[in-house]
Image (cartoon, helix red, strand yellow):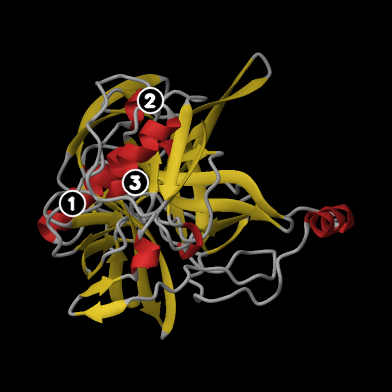
Amino acid sequence: MDLGPPPHRLAGGGDLPDPAWPSTEWPAGPIGPPTEPFRSQEEDEEAERRSTRRTLVVSLLAGVLLGTGVTLGVLAVLGLLDGNVVRVPRTTLAAAPTTTAPPDLPEGATASITQVAETAIPSIVAVTSLIDGLPSGGSGVVYSEDGHLLTNHHVIENATDLRVIFSDGIAFDAEVVGSDPLTDIAVLHTDRTDLTPIRLGSEADLVIGERTVAVGNPLGLIGGPSVTSGILSAKGRSLQVTADTILYGLLQTDAPITRGSSGGALLDEEGKLIGITTAIGVSDVGAEGLGFAVPVDLAVSVAEDLIADGRVRHAMLGIQGTTATEQIDGAEIPLGVSVSSMLSGSAYESAGGRLGDVIVAVDGEEVSSIQELIADLRMKRAGDVVVVTALRQDEELTFPVELGEWRE
């Protein structure tokens, strides 16, 4: 699926309507002390009163906090080198949890935040690296007992000297198994074998307003992962995180997360993984309580491809399109995706699709906007056959489409 730089293209092309995308950055800032002292609460309140506008930006969770003038990042973890293992001083390990998780909760049971934390913390790691010679990092999640970890693409992009630090303070060198910029998911591998994989949930079971728990390594603070809580604020969010990168189908939460938490875990009230934390919304006065995560179903789908093949064969429909609407009693209602152009020989054209079609469903699932269509196709792979439902001159048609492969 070709998403390209704005104007955005869907599956080989497709201009999106001109939404008011927030300004964005995707920093991977240095590790070190703040460049200026933290402000007091009174100074923060005065700064907010002076501000005449609040510009919302989307900020990925590794690097420099935007809009504050304070450089924040993953703090250096000091230890004694021993082969590929860093042994942290005993004073650091004293309060750190072990990698042995408590027994799983009964299926469907609602846990306290304490229980969720006890279950999840052994499965969370800090990821440190060098980017352009400067220390940087984020978080990660233990995916399998054989050493595979999930994190974000932007955490490890252009990184060298990758290392993961487990919740007990022990660190191992890590290698990149594969990385996918379109979904911001990467898979790492370490040689540690006594790991506790995170329990997996599903986006399908999520309800807006239910409790969420975020676990990561904000600012790389020594002493193990940090735990915060909130609710699931929304599903299906689309965010432009760089000039040419848009993430689709994200979960939104108000659980406090911050720099260094990229690649960490967003959990449901049973302590199961529901997303990989990726971005936050901040303004000129600080964090806005907007956190975003890649849904677990998508993260796992991408991870399995990366582990098996080292890459993801993203699907390509081969159309350009915009969100179509219809007027009913004076209201403008999203209807589907109007096909404005097609690549010659594309999957959609080869299946009998035509210009002017309005795609309203894929595999029986309604599609009301181009963002929904892109998010749905993210779960598909090149060569998959999907059943497309489209409106053509007041006639509803259903036909199979064998998806092509997206190429940069």
Q: Return the residue found at the far bottom.
A: 133
Q: Position of residue 45 (x, y in %)?
A: 83, 53
User: Which residue is at a point 20% across and 54% down the rendered structure image?
Assistant: 313
Amino acid of disc 2: Ala
Name the one closer to the observer, 106 or 390. 106
Q: Position of residue 33 (x, y in %)?
A: 58, 75
Name the one closer to the observer, 135 or 345. 135
Bin the neighbour count of mark 2 within 10 Å (Cα to Cα): few under 14, some 14-19, many 20 and up: some
The reply to whether callout 3 and callout 1 are in contact (CB within 8 Å) is no
The quadrant the C terminus occupies is bottom left
Amino acid of disc 1: Leu
Residue beneath label 1, please? 195
Residue beneath label 2, please? 111
Amino acid of disc 3: Ile
Q: What number is the disc on residue 121?
A: 3
Bin the neighbour count of mark 1 within 10 Å (Cα to Cα): few under 14, some 14-19, many 20 and up: some
